[in-house]
Amino acid sequence: MEKVQIMDVTLRDGLQNESFLLEEEEKLYLANGLAEAGFRRIEAGAFVNPKAVPQMAGTADLFKNHLGQSASKSDFYALIPNEKGYELAKAAGVSNMAFVMAVTEEMNQKNVRMSVEDSFEQFLKIFQRSKEDQLNMRLYLAVVFHCPFEGVTDEKKAIEWINEFQHLGVADLCLADTDGMAKPEQVQRVLEATIPVYTQLETTLSLHLHNTYGYAAENLRVALKAGLRHFDSAVAGLGGCPFAPGAKGNIASEDLVAICEAEGFDTGIDSKKLGELSQWLGNIKLERTKGQKA
Ligand SMILES: [Zn+2]
């Protein structure tokens, strides 16, 4: 059976748009549980301003005290928005990082308070340093399909960015449908224009879906058909970007696994273990959001 690899982003993208917080021990329990369930890549936090994103506070301690020296078969990732984030992550023992850059000006300003050009410059510097430091660097391209501020993303421009990064040697590139507004035809066109480069260069191209209008499952099927084999998801479909108005949860890991397996792919995920984690997290959410307005 052909394999599909799933990166779980519950602890970062999932939590950051939720109104409840997890303690360090709970984050560790979830990270280890996800590894046990078979996720080989797990995003566990972000080095961002804890005042702006309180859910990500404690990421440095989580890596310093636990994940940075974990003997797990899985790789734990942390998101960094800039060079300062790189320094902090490196100091905490993070060896797998993810940088984020939006392909539209307004989203990039809102998300990381920089122009796209400045983010690109920062990325090139950080990417070079990561190679010298022998750290893995993933690049998220945000709002590849649709931007909450600028509308439908210029497809030609998005494809140019994707192919440029692949040619620059970025071996791990993730295309994010940040606000969950990508349409299946659009996903198909963008992948058809970028998958040949990915196949030729043997890079990892991933798709990061949100389920705002229920398109995520169809977008996933289109991507599988186009030949994509790497996807992101979050347990129970938690999450969304706090700086992208209207953005809903990530595609649920449970749905992603079920759809991939129904389409004949092997995800290597233990659905029973995943279900237990989902229930555990759901109970915490229920308990901590009682009485809060949605
Ligand atoms: Zn996301």
Image (spheres, grey):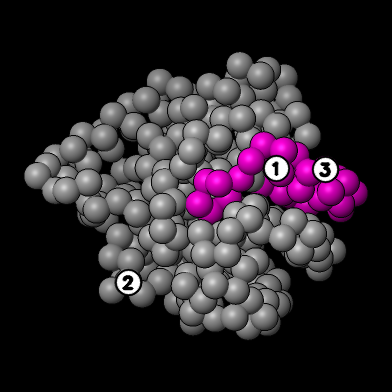
Residue nearer the viewer, 144 or 5:
144
**Label 1: element kind:** helix
Please tell me how crowded label 1 is: few (under 14), some (14-19), or many (20+) other residues with Cα within 10 Å: many
Determine if residue 208 is in view: no
Residue nearer the viewer, 201 or 182:
182
Residue nearer the viewer, 255 or 274:
255
Residue type at tag 2: Ala
Determine if residue 211 is in view: yes
Residue type at tag 1: Val
Region in magenta: 177-206
- Position of residue 24 in the picture relative to residue 119 (left or right): left
The image position of residue 226, as x and y in percent, is 78, 34
- Residue 52: mark in rendering: 2
Of all residues shown, which one is farthest toward the left? Answer: 291
Residue 190 drawn in magenta: yes
Disc 3 designates what residue?
192
